[in-house]
Image: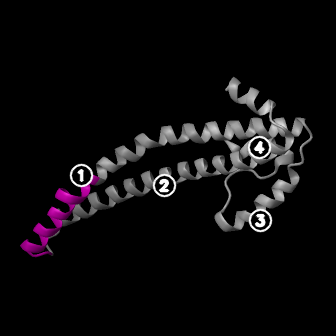
Amino acid sequence: MDIFVRGINTLPNDILRDAVLEKYASAERSYLRLLLATWNLEETKCRVHTQEQILCFLETTHSLTELEYKYWMEMYTDRGLPELKDNVLLHGNQIPSIAQDADRDGGELTMMVQQARERGIDLDSFDDELKGHEDDVGSSVDLDFGQGMAGAG
């Protein structure tokens, strides 16, 4: 991190200003990747739960023909449920790495914004520029550069 801090300290103001915008985009992307990974995990857990309930229902209900019952049992036991349970583990194992990337990007963005403010670089116009794109893609990171980057991590 010391190398990063020394690097941004030596940048001219115009380049630092542009670098803040670039880092903002990286931090936003990292945060959204984390959000997506978390929802993928939640969706898969819910799907496992639902399929387990359906499987239990099919086993206790005698409303299906033997052929229908066999079809549904194969669907949930051979092809669906075991794979979904593996996916729960996969999604769960990916989240710590993605969260680490989001924390790093947010921390770097905070340091860059602080450095820019200390130099008196105007980031308020950035705020307006970024808010113009907010409606296009949504926003997860605090856009108020004048108040700090509390939401950037």
Q: Amino acid at mark 1?
A: Pro
Q: Is residue 12 left or right of residue 7?
A: right
How far apart in space, not on screen, are marks 2 and 3 (Cα)? 27 Å
Residue 132's label in the rendered image is: 3
Residue sticking out furthest to the left: 66
Q: Which residue is mark 4?
A: 149
Q: What residue is rendered at 38% in x and 55% in y?
A: 44
Measured from the top left, where is residue 126 in percent x and y?
82, 54
Q: Check the image and report above or below for 152 versus 111.
A: below
Q: Earlier in the sequence, mark 4 or mark 1?
A: 1
Residue sticking out furthest to the top: 2
Q: Which is more toward the observer, 135 or 118?
A: 118
Q: Which residue is mark 2?
A: 39
- As for residue 71 lying within the magenta part, the answer is yes
- Counting other residues with Cα less than 10 Å from the Cα at mark 1, is it few (<14), some (14-19), or many (20 or more)? few
How far apart in space, not on screen, are marks 1 and 2 (Cα)? 20 Å
Measured from the top left, where is residue 10 in percent x and y?
81, 31
Which quadrant is home to the C terminus? Answer: top right
Q: Amino acid at mark 2?
A: Trp
Q: Amino acid at mark 4?
A: Met
Q: Main secondary structure of the magenta part?
A: helix
Q: Which residue is mark 1?
A: 82
- Counting other residues with Cα less than 10 Å from the Cα at mark 2, is it few (<14), some (14-19), or many (20 or more)? few
Q: What residue is rendered at 41% in x and 40% in y?
A: 93
In this picture, which residue range is highlighted in magenta?
A: 64-83
Which element carries disc 3, helix, strand or loop?
helix
Q: Is residue 25 left or right of residue 63?
A: right
